[in-house]
Image (tube, rainbow, N blue to C red):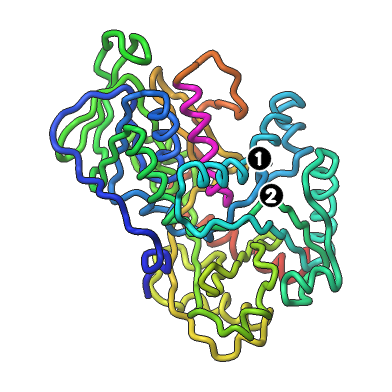
Amino acid sequence: MPNLYRDTAEPAAVTPPLDGDIRADVAVVGGGFTGLSTALHLAEKGVKVVVLEAEEPGWGASGRNGGQVNPGLKHDPDTVERNFGQDLGGRMNALAGAAPQFVFDLIQRYGIACEARQNGTLRAAIAPKHAAAVRVTAEQWQRRQAPVECLSGKALADLTGTDRYRVALFDRRGGDLNPLSYARGLARAAMGAGARVHGGTRATGLTQVGSTGAGSLGAGSAWQVATPSGTVTAQQVVLATNGYTDDLWPDLRRSVVPVFGAIAATAPLPESVARAVMPSRAVLYESGAITVYYRVDGGSRLLIGGRGPQTEISSTAPLSHLLNYAHKLWPALGDIAWTHAWGGRLAMTQDSYSHWHEPAKGLLACVAYNGRGVAMATTMGALIAKRILDPAALCDMPITALKPIALHGLWPLAVRGAILRGRVSDFLGL
């Protein structure tokens, strides 16, 4: 069973492998949302930028995720401001809250065909503890004048087609899209603005090679990125590899935990069934230790995702828990066929914040969106570009020291243990 997006996405742009040795102002390693957004926003300003992607643009989590464009960070706004102070924390909240609109505006500006809809995000709770947390989150966003409200009872059932939830935060800033089409559209936009994008080009080495003459970014140190078919020498390098980070800069891989998500999709729902399943066409993710998320796409297919086996999948067999849960939510699904199942790696951090690092002069890295990658990765790409263009400008996200996780090699066992504990906790309503 293939990834649904590969069957339905807009065609990919031609991104041939790098051939030979070239020079650029900026080399970006990774052709997902972060790397492509960075390249686009740099190219718009006349910067000579080259993107190196091991597979093809959108191949990783950017082209495999749930397609939800959700506002905010993992933590509540008050927590963010306690962690980072009212000034920086306030700017972080404003940035993350506005991130979906940034995405939708970018899509409109470049005419990216990706089934984008701004129908809102529902964060729904089943257990009393989680319902209380949802109400707290809603109150905090309302104090910040965000367009959110708490729904329950019939109003919530009318939006979702199920009476399973006690309460949900309805955030009108959110929405959905076909993420692979979006990634491919970003690649086209970046190339149209002057960026070079090379697929099938894995970065295999990263070396500081002295200094360069004055370029569009001024004079400075230079880096050389090696690949099997050539090199890129650039003043700045951006590492945007997220859950597929390797040992190109070893400490970076050990600073995040790769976690596999898994998604199943139905055949297009008959009209009578489509009216009963998420009739609002908002997207929903559950509040709990182990998140289940779902939406009905523009082709009337139900997509439901969550934690699956911590490996790639090619059938619905490992996802029986998600399929059974979907039928529990909407018995009207009946014997509808499940036609697609796929998974991929995203990156998580111990503190549930995205990590932006500058581990050496001229080297930037940004990884880990903790389940909010569509909106935040796009936005972070623009911030990275701003940082490169004007290093003295105020940053709306913290730049932190790179800290490897202790006993990182045990992450598969740790993730499986955390998933098991989370499922037990959710089942007991703890």
> On the image, which quarter does residue 143 sit in?
top right
Q: Quadrant of the N terminus?
A: bottom left
Q: What element carries label 2?
A: loop
Does the image show residue 251? no
Kindly identify which residue carries mark 2: 173
Query: In terms of sequence position, does the residue under pointer 1 or pointer 2 come before the other?
Result: 1
Against 366, residue 312 (above or below) is below
In the displayed structure image, the side of residue 222 where residue 125 appears, left or right: right
Whether residue 380 is in magenta: the answer is: yes
Q: Are marks 1 and 2 in contact (CB under 8 Å)?
A: yes
Whether residue 168 is in magenta: the answer is: no
- The secondary structure making up most of the magenta span is helix
Q: What element carries label 1?
A: helix
For label 2, the crowd category at 10 Å Cα-Cα, with few meaning under 14, some 14 to 19 and many 20 or more, is: many
Q: In which quarter of the image is the C terminus?
A: bottom right
Q: Which residue is drawn at 65% across and 87% down?
A: 332
Q: Position of residue 161 (x, y in %)?
A: 72, 76
Q: How many labels does the image show?
A: 2
- Please, what is the three-letter code of the amino acid marked with disc 1? Ala
Q: Give the range drawn in magenta.
A: 368-388
> On the image, which quarter does residue 307 sit in?
bottom right
Against 226, residue 332 (above or below) is below
Q: Whole-Å distance between the Cαs marked 1 and 2?
A: 8 Å
Q: Residue at x 50, y 24 (%)?
A: 386
Kindly identify which residue carries mark 1: 98
